[in-house]
Image: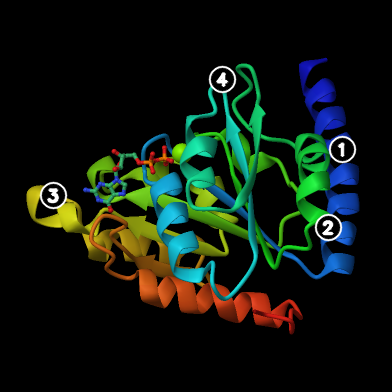
């Protein structure tokens, strides 16, 4: 019975995600689903990315969190529009939550909508939100084994950011092993090695993001 219920839930989610994707596509907004464990640096990467790109493109953000609006407050300080979703304990966002949250943001006609998912490497991987791209952050202090232990989220990633590279000298994190593990399960994914703390790699990441927005057909970039 449990399996049937989960199948129904995912089926209903797929329908709404399909509808979201059509709306995003008609509007020409690039939508990114940003996922990671808690604390890998999603919000910090987003803050730094917004600060680099906000003069060139219009950015909007949906923040997913269990209970608080702390991340939304951080993003608001960057001067972009943000809507907070509190899942009240649910470990992932779903397409229906994003459908509600995006309405007032889309009215502003953004070029890029970033959805910061609930910090979790398992549940968010299963729920399509209607996004164009899935971005997954893994950070150096989390260790070498996350790719093989949580393969689904990395298998489905369009881009993987390895963050906190500034901490590399203080850990046994093995860059070659992580590259090899990603290559085995998702050879086509794009990988960026970054430090949101000192800015390393963010120029390359931001340029790639702009290319994706152009590819989506945005020509009115500011
Ligand atoms: N050393 C270091 N710390 C970072 C980096 N990026 C984020 N942090 C810190 O990691 C903690 C969690 O970051 P946050 O962006 O809130 O992670 P989130 O939970 O994935 O959104 C904060 O204390 C950040 O200052 C980085 O590149 N290097
Ligand atoms: Mg966060």
Q: Residues within 10 Å of mark 4 (few under 14, many from 20)?
A: few
Q: Name the residue under label 4.
A: 67
As drawn, the label of residue 172 is 3
Kindly identify which numbered label has been placed on residue 11: 1
List x then y, in percent, for residue 28.
80, 70
Q: Can residue 93 be seen in this view?
A: yes
Q: Of tags 4 and 3, which is closer to the observer? A: 4
The numbered dot on residue 21 is 2
Q: Quadrant of residue 5?
A: top right
Mark 2 or mark 1: whose residue is earlier in sequence = 1
Earlier sequence position, callout 4 versus callout 3? 4
Residue located farthest toward the left when viewing the structure as drawn: 170
User: Where on the picture, by quarter, is residue 125?
Assistant: top right
Query: Residue at coordinates 60% horizontally, 17% vertically from top-left?
Result: 89
Residue 36 is labelled as: none
Which residue is painted at 19% across and 52% down in the image? 173
Instruction: In this rendered view, identify the residue nearer to me: 104 or 146.
Output: 104
**Crowding near pointer 2: few (<14 within 10 Å), some, many (20+)?**
many
**Secondary structure of residue under mark 3:** loop
Q: How far apart are marks 4 and 2 (CA)?
A: 27 Å
Q: Which quarter of the rendered image does ligand 1 occupy?
A: top left
């Amino acid at each position: 019975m449990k399996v049937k219920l989960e199948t129904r839930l995912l089926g209903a989610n797929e329908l709404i995600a399909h509808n979201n994707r059509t709306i995003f596509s008609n509007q020409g907004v690039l939508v990114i689903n940003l996922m990671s464990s808690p604390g890998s640096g999603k919000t910090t990467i987003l803050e730094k990315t917004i600060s680099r790109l906000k003069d060139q493109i219009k950015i909007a953000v949906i923040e997913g969190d269990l209970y608080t609006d702390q991340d939304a407050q951080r993003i608001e300080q960057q001067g972009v529009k943000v809507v907070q979703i509190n899942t009240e304990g649910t470990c992932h966002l779903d397409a229906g939550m994003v459908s509600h949250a995006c309405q007032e943001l889309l009215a502003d006609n953004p070029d890029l909508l970033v959805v910061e998912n609930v910090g979790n490497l398992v549940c968010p991987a299963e729920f399509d939100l209607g996004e164009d791209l899935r971005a997954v952050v893994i950070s150096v202090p989390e260790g070498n084994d996350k790719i093989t232990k949580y393969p689904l989220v990395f298998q489905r990633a369009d881009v993987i950011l390895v963050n906190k590279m500034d901490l590399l000298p203080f850990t046994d994190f093995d860059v070659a092993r992580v590259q090899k593990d990603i290559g085995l399960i998702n050879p086509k994914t794009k990988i960026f090695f970054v430090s949101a703390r000192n800015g390393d790699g963010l120029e390359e990441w931001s340029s790639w993001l702009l290319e994706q927005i152009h590819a989506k057909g945005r020509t009115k970039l500011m």
